[in-house]
Image (spheres, helix red, strand yellow):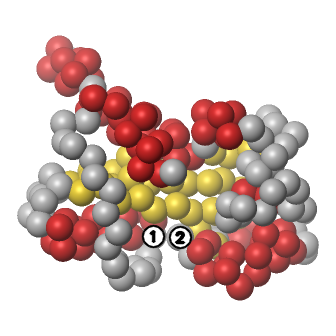
């Protein structure tokens, strides 16, 4: 559960009460940062208050970073097997998973981005098929795909965890003190 993971990692460091809310946002196109900023601004407009939105990309080096932010559609049409087959004509199977959390304190406030990246490669799908592209993404220095890893291990190295850790660090009182000391 994403909202549970967010609460666990941000804990009491985050200066707002976290409430998970499903809202309809347009599917923006562009670079990952642009998409995250647009989604965050629109969510803040709809909520009329502070929001956090998440965007996830799966990027193949051989394809210049595609599917990137369009992974949802690629996965829907191709499944993990098709994602793997996309790279059949390429020696380079390296990839990275990117998670971006965008935060704004209100609809007319600036948007802050917190990114997490996990390097890896695209492999023939292995493991349970219950979570998106996890069966075909094998993180660097592991011999198992995201799908094969125990949940606790995956959650400690994932792109989402890294983005949340960056956000948690940003909002921790220690981080604020450190900035004023410089």
Image position of 174 (left or right of 124): left
Relative vertical location of residue 174 with respect to residue 126 in this rendering, above or below: above
Q: Residue at x 17, y 55 (%)?
A: 50
Q: Residue at x 86, y 61 (%)?
A: 125
Q: Nearer the viewer, residue 129 or 119?
A: 129
Count the marks: how many? 2
Residue 118 lies, in percent from the top left, at 63, 45
Residue 60 lies, in percent from the top left, at 70, 64
Question: Does the CB distance between marks 1 and 2 fall below 8 Å?
Answer: yes
Q: Which residue, given by chain and number where applicable, does mark 2 sit on?
A: 69
Disc 1/disc 2 C-alpha distance (Å):
8 Å
Residue 29 lies, in percent from the top left, at 44, 80
The circle drawn on residue 31 is: 1
Q: Is residue 177 visible?
A: yes
Q: Residue at x 19, y 36 (%)?
A: 15
Image position of 38 (left or right of 70): left
Name which of mark 1 and mark 2 comes first in the sequence.
1
Q: Nearer the viewer, residue 55 or 120?
A: 55
Residue 99 lies, in percent from the top left, at 50, 53
């Amino acid at each position: 559960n994403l909202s549970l993971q967010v609460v666990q990692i941000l804990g009491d460091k985050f200066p707002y009460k976290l409430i998970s809310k499903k809202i309809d946002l347009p599917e923006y196109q562009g670079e990952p940062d642009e998409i995250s900023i647009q989604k965050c601004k629109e969510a803040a407009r709809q909520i009329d208050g502070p929001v956090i939105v998440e965007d996830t990309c799966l990027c193949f080096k051989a394809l210049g970073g595609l599917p990137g932010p369009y992974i949802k559609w690629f996965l829907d049409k191709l499944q993990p097997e098709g994602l793997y087959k996309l790279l059949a004509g390429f020696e380079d199977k390296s990839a990275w998973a990117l998670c971006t959390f965008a935060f704004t304190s209100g609809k007319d406030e600036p948007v802050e981005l917190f990114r997490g990246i996990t390097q890896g490669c695209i492999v023939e799908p292995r493991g349970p098929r219950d979570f998106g592209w996890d069966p075909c993404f094998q993180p660097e220095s592991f011999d198992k795909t995201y799908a094969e890893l125990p949940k606790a291990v995956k959650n400690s190295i994932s792109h989402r965890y890294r983005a949340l850790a960056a956000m948690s660090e940003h909002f921790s009182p220690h981080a604020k003190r450190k900035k004023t000391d410089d």
